[in-house]
Structures are given as structure tokens and as C-alpha cells.
Image (cartoon, grey):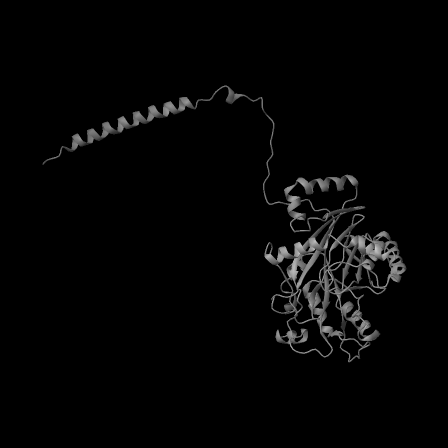
Amino acid sequence: MKIDISLLIRCFGIFCVAFFLCSCAHTLDEDKAQAITEQDMDLSTREIFVLESGKCTAHIPTSAKLSFVGDNVLGDYKGSSGQTFNAKFAEVNEDFAYFSAGVREVLLSDDLTIGNMEGVLSDKNLKNAFEKPFSFKGTSRYTEILKIAGFEALNVANNHSRDYGAQGFQDTIEHLSNAGLAVFGEGIIHLYEVNGIRFGLAGHRGWNLGIKSQVKKEIDLLRSKGADIVIFTFHWGEERMHYPNAAQRELAHFTIDSGADMVIGHHPHVLQGIEEYKGKKIVYSLGNFIYGGAKNPSDKDTMIYQTHFIKLDSRQDRKEFLEELRFDVCAREAYLNKDYIPNIERIDTIEDFVLIHSIIPASISSTPSHNDYSPKIYEKDSAPYRRVLQRMQQYSTLKNQAKSLKKSRK
């Protein structure tokens, strides 16, 4: 069959022309529908709107974030054996960082970490100063554990700091100071400046209420030396009791009444509650932390207590900042991203400062079966995490407060 090529070309040409005309007709219809109108030419609305986007960045005024932890026992007690603190140090090939692997990220991200140094650090062959079953002592090298963990300041006012007499006590202070760590307690007061804020630190054993006059004297001295914030720590209370006794409350209230801004406690080796007194916080017991005092305590729950001190020079600035915390997403993300106790006010205003409090639930051991001397932070919203918050809420109700206070007045 013979194909007429010229005819085929003419047919294809006709098809293309028809397709082009149809397309034009459709385009003309669209153009007619989208024609510029008089409204499009109107210039009466000339307001300019500026939109911004990016990551949340809250306004950060002068501030300092402090972390508080409980008892640190670095070393063994006399006559101990088995899986002790010293044995663990040898087992991990003298890795100083091992003992803070689960908490270091938090402590290094704050501005000042404060703990209780319970026991003696000395390389001397010292004799026990007292007849007691537990006398704690470790090598001076253990200061490296504290430094790597992120500590900046240590309280030495406790019932074990003189286990090896005056020499052991002096050695401990010397080794901590030589390691660049601030030392306070037992009549030693310390001014520690962070971001232009001067924190006055002091501490005492709190079983004898006769210490009151000394407490008042140290608070006044810290104020006279320019302390913006005074934090007083006490080693007090009864072991394994979750509620403070009458003496603790009386001394805590006296300390606040005498001008301290915050009271921090330890010694019971378990957590105790938090009290709001005259707009200021009393944290009665932080429990244990890096704790070589027992190989397998039944209660391993602990916490890192954090307070963010924000300095705002005028009442208007403080009012505006508090409004930001209520309504501004970025401010809430920056300052309220951790948990606290529902029944205790977490934001305080003290003179030129706004204080924001948080609790980070933790364990003194990275394993529940025994104490491996390596504290860890509980995973957020896990069962242990919620348990610590629930326990703190329970202990902070201070159910026996009225009875204890009545008893203390007799």
C-alpha cells in the first residue's frame, strides 16, 4: 500500500493549527477571569507587617543557676571490705569520671554546684578521733572526682568531717582548696561570685540550737561583705526519717528570720520535704549523692535541687518578667522546662531577684541491685522519676508540723 506523504503532512498541519486555536481560546478565557480589577489597583492600605521566625530565644537577664546535692562520701569506713568505694575505684581502673557519668551533664551545665563533703580526704596515716562504727576517709586524689563531676563548692560542716581529728579536718580543707573548690562550713564562710551575683555560703551542724547566735553572726557578716544572696546549709535531723523534726524547723525558721534567703539540709540519708516559709525555701534533706557510706542502702532515691536566680533591678522589670513566664512560650521553655512539686510555689521574689525552683529526680546508683557509687538521673516521666516527685509532694505536706512545733515550744 502506497502512503501519500504530502497528504499526511497537510493533515498534521491542520491538527496543530486547531490545537493552537483551542489553547488560545482557553487562555483567553482564563485571562478574562483573572483580569486586574480596580480593587487590585487600590493603594489605600499601606500598613507594613513584620514577621519573624526562628528558634525560641528568651530574653536572658543577669542570672545564675545553682544545683544542690546531698551527702558525698568518697572513701571507705574503717574495717570495711568487699565491694566498697575504694574497691570500685580500683575496678574501674581509677577512672575518676566513672562516679559522675550519669549526672555530669546536668552539673556541668549550671553555674554553681554545691554539695556536702562528708568525711575526710587525707593521705596521712591518721588515727580515729572518736569511737564510732563509721569513720570515713579517702585519698586526696578523690578531689578529682568532684572536679570532673562539676562541683564548685563543698560544705564541710557535718558529723564525719572530724572523724580523724583536727589534722584530718585541716587536710580535707587544704586538698579541696588546692583543687580549686570553694570550701565553707564550721565557721568558714565563703563569698562566691557568679555572673556578677555574690552568693554568701555558710554551714553548721544543726543538732544543738545553741548555734543560733553564730548563725545570725555569720549571716550579718556575709551581708556586710556584699552578699546578694545568703544560702545557709545545715547537717541535721534524724537518719532515715522523711519528715523534719521540731529542732530542724525551729533552726530553719530562725535562719530565715535572721536574713538568709535559702536553707539547704542533709544528713538523714533520705529525702525530706520542702517548706515555704515567709516566701523562702527550706529544703530539709537532699539525701545521698556520690555515696560511699553503704554498699546497698534500701532507699537509693535522691534528687538534684536547682534554683535559677534572676536579677532584675526594678519592680517593673520583675513584673514584666513574671508576665513573660505566664504567657511567653520562649520564656517558659527557657525557665520552666523542669518539674517541681505541685503543692509548693516554684517561683519566689526576693528583693531584686526572681527565684525559679526545679527538681531533677535521680538515684545514687546506676543499678537498682546494689550501690555502684555512680548516681544517675532517672529518665523523665519514668516510674522512678514520678515516684521521687510523688514522694517529695508527700513529704512536703509536713503533716506532723503542728505537733512538732507545739512540742518544740515546751
Looking at this view, name the residue that lies furthest to the left: 1
Q: In the picture, residue 407 is in which quadrant?
A: bottom right
Which of the 4 image quarters holds residue 301? bottom right
Q: Is residue 281 visible?
A: yes
Can you give x and y, in whole percent of width and height, for residue 129 in the image? 82, 76
Q: Nearer the viewer, residue 314 or 17?
A: 314
Asked where in the image residue 371 lies, by quadrant, the reply is bottom right
- The one nearer the camera, 174 or 214, is 214
**Residue beneath the point at 23% across and 29% down:** 13
Q: How many marks?
A: 0
Residue 150 position in % (x across, y down): 69, 62
> Where in the figure is residue 5, as x and y percent of width and height?
16, 33
Residue drawn at point x = 13 percent, y = 34 percent: 3
Asked whether the viewer can see residue 255, the reply is: no
**Residue at the top extreme, as displayed:** 38
Is 86 rendered above or below residue 55? below
Residue 2 locus on image (x, y percent) = 10, 35
